[in-house]
Amino acid sequence: MIMKKCSVCFLLFIASLTINCTKQVIKPAATDIPHPVEPLVINIPKTADEEAREKQKEKAIEIARNLPLNIKIGQMITCYPPSFEFVKKYQIGGVILNQNFIRDLASTAQMIENYNKDAIIPLFFAIDQEGGKVNRLKHIEGYKKTPSAKELGKSYSKKELLAYAYRTAATMRNMGINVNLAPSLDISSSENALMNVQERSLGSNLITVKKQTETLIDGYRAGGVLCFAKHYPGYGDVRINSDVTVAHYNFPAIRMIENLNLFLALSHKIDGIIMSSVIYTDFDSVPALFSKSIIDLIRFSNPDILVMTDDLYAPALRILENEDLSVIAAKTFYAGNDILLILWDIKALILMDAIEKIITAHPEMEEQVNHSVTRILLAKNRIYPGLIDTLYASLKTTDETPPE
């Protein structure tokens, strides 16, 4: 009881000192401080690079608004290698290759040159060169065996990661391949997680994986390729393949948020993301690539980041939508995906037709197409320097040509 009274007294003593000290420093409020008539505005000047990027974006927006609708829709499609005539007729935006189409440097480079020959806007040529079991360069000399993401994350130094990524990207660019659908940002801690079983996860520690990813991206981009990270917002410890079976994220929501934050933290460094087809029950009732709310989260961080679906002909999606590819295409479009990926070239026509029907019924939706094409042009300008200026000059020449 005595101790309690002493403690109370001590606290009162400290309080009195504080009050006395406070009294000593308080001064009468000044009454002669002038108040600005108008709100104070601080102008922060833009750097030369920022101004250049803004001008490029303004040009890209104008190009997108003036392109014919069929070409704009074509730009939103990436598929397995179709015929050269198909590209000429439909002006698709990209081609995805696997190891069966990359037999050697010379033939791959020639194929890519032939695709671009009749393209109004040159194409994305993409592979998912994650390494390990996902090795699209296996027929190229020096790439028969490549380290998996698990090996890269576990035993490679920063210098080694940078060298590996640069060498890989330089090899890709020598053939004309300009997009790597990697690295995987899926944070997996369970040995039974699909991404761990397939050795496609860099690790389980968010901070470490962030640093490793930044180094890999620096290497890839120095070598001249764009990077599309996967699988947004994070595959985590999901054990089943969501391409084959409808998969739900049955883990605490905080785990998904941690993985999502990794994507957000890197959103200004990566060029695009590949969407997950897992259903994140705490956030939406549909697969992530159908979820506008999940896609909008990364748009807040970087409005210009490209969003690409995973394969839209995957069995799990067809199970969900009763084999109706038109419905699948419509849902991914409404969700805000910029690029619709399909691993069957002829089925790309269904995707394009679905988008065209939406715009015919709802003309205001063409503005969403314009936004996607603007993002696509900005990304393509990084791998085809001068592309936007060339297209813009052509647009202006057409505008100024008097009618006959």
Image (cartoon, grey):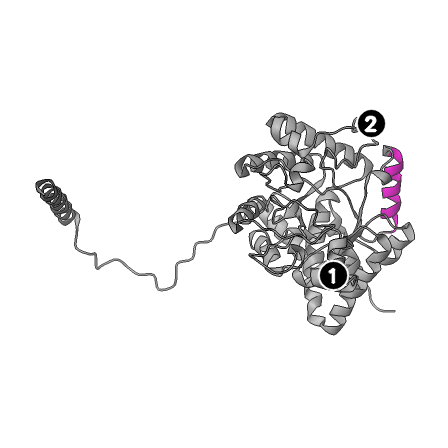
Residue 122: within the magenta? no
- Secondary structure beneath dot 2 equals loop
- Secondary structure beneath dot 1 equals helix
* Type of amino acid at the residue the image marks with label 1: Ile
Q: Does the image show residue 398?
A: no
Q: Is the residue marked by circle 1 packed among few (<14), some (14-19), or many (20+) residues within 10 Å?
A: many
Name the spot of residue 190 as percent of width and height, x first.
59, 38
Name the spot of residue 355 as percent of width and height, x first.
76, 64
Hey, which residue is sitting farthest left in the picture?
2
In the rendered view, does 276 fall on the left or right side of 319?
A: left
Name the spot of residue 326 as percent of width and height, x first.
78, 64
| Residue 141 disc label | 2
Q: Quadrant of residue 270?
A: top right
Is 218 rendered above or below residue 380? above
How far apart in space, not on screen, are marks 1 and 2 (Cα)? 39 Å
Name the spot of residue 343 as percent of width and height, x first.
81, 50
In the rendered image, which quarter contains the C terminus? Answer: bottom right
| Residue 328 disc label | 1
* Type of amino acid at the residue the image marks with label 2: Glu
Q: Which residues are magenta?
A: 106-118
What residue lies at 82% left-to-right and 57% top-to-bottom? Answer: 348
What residue lies at 28% left-to-right and 59% top-to-bottom? Answer: 34
In the rendered image, which quarter contains the N terminus? Answer: top left
